[in-house]
Amino acid sequence: MIVAPSVLSLDYSRMNEQMQEVNASGAQWLHFDVMDGHFVPNLTFGPDILKGFCKLSSLFMDVHLMVDDPRKVCDFFLPAGADMITFHIEAVEPEKIRELAEYLHSKGVQAGLAIKPNTPLELLKPYLHDFDMFLIMCVEPGFGGQAFNEGAPERISTLRSWLNEEGLDTHIEVDGGINAETAVKVKEAGADVLVAGSYIFKDDIRKAVKSLG
């Protein structure tokens, strides 16, 4: 299992201290949520903040774009240190989705495709061979600390079965409401990358990461 702490929930008054704990926790990725105030009703980070995290950690930088224009925004984060850029299927015209994945690969980074809880899962099917990871949102994107959507494991299981049928071992990432209990459900369904924010940063970071791995 890959554990990806979401810095959206980090205590920025203790940034250096908490990042030292994350680096020593066994987490493999760092999840970086980019929100534009339009695609989702919240604003978060720009590329300079990502550059700062790259100075504090050598973890894999997993950048999740929750923005209206991911093609434009990804160009800000590519030189800032992103290792993977994930964008939302709802934000891009269908004929442009594969093109953007190819563009990201041409720039030497991995490409991910995210989907909201109420978007039909079948929309992912044409793109199974084009992405390194699919992100199943277990909450409506935009804010941390939301309750886990109990329909998510079934969506994960269905997507994993489609990937298996195609002989693909593509990552399935989950984000939203992940804790020790919900992690069991999504892992059993076929997820292999767990994003967690408030659960990891609210108390003992190392203990929380270990409980998810």
Image (cartoon, rainbow, N blue to C red):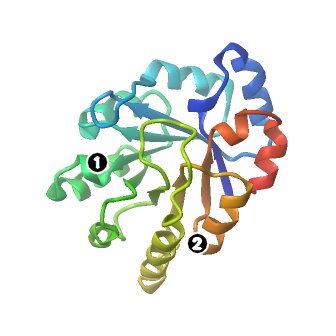
- Distance between the Cα atoms at labels 1 and 2? 28 Å
Residue 1 can be seen, yes or no? no
Question: Residue 190, labelled with which disc?
Answer: 2
- Residue 90 image offset from top left, x and y in percent: 26, 51
Identify the element where label 2 is drawn: loop
Nearest to viewer (mark 1 / mark 2): 2
- Compare residues 192 and 147 and report the one nearer the observer: 147
Identify the element where label 1 is drawn: helix
- Residue 161 image offset from top left, x and y in percent: 47, 81
Q: What's the amino acid at mark 1?
A: Tyr
Residue 43 can be seen, yes or no? yes
Q: Badge 2 local density, few (<14 within 10 Å), some, or many (20+)? A: many
- Residue at image mark 1: 103
- Residue 177 image offset from top left, x and y in percent: 59, 49
Name the residue rendered at 49%, 73% in the picture: 154
The image shows residue 84, relative to residue 7, as above or below, that is: below
- Compare residues 137 and 97 and report the one nearer the observer: 137
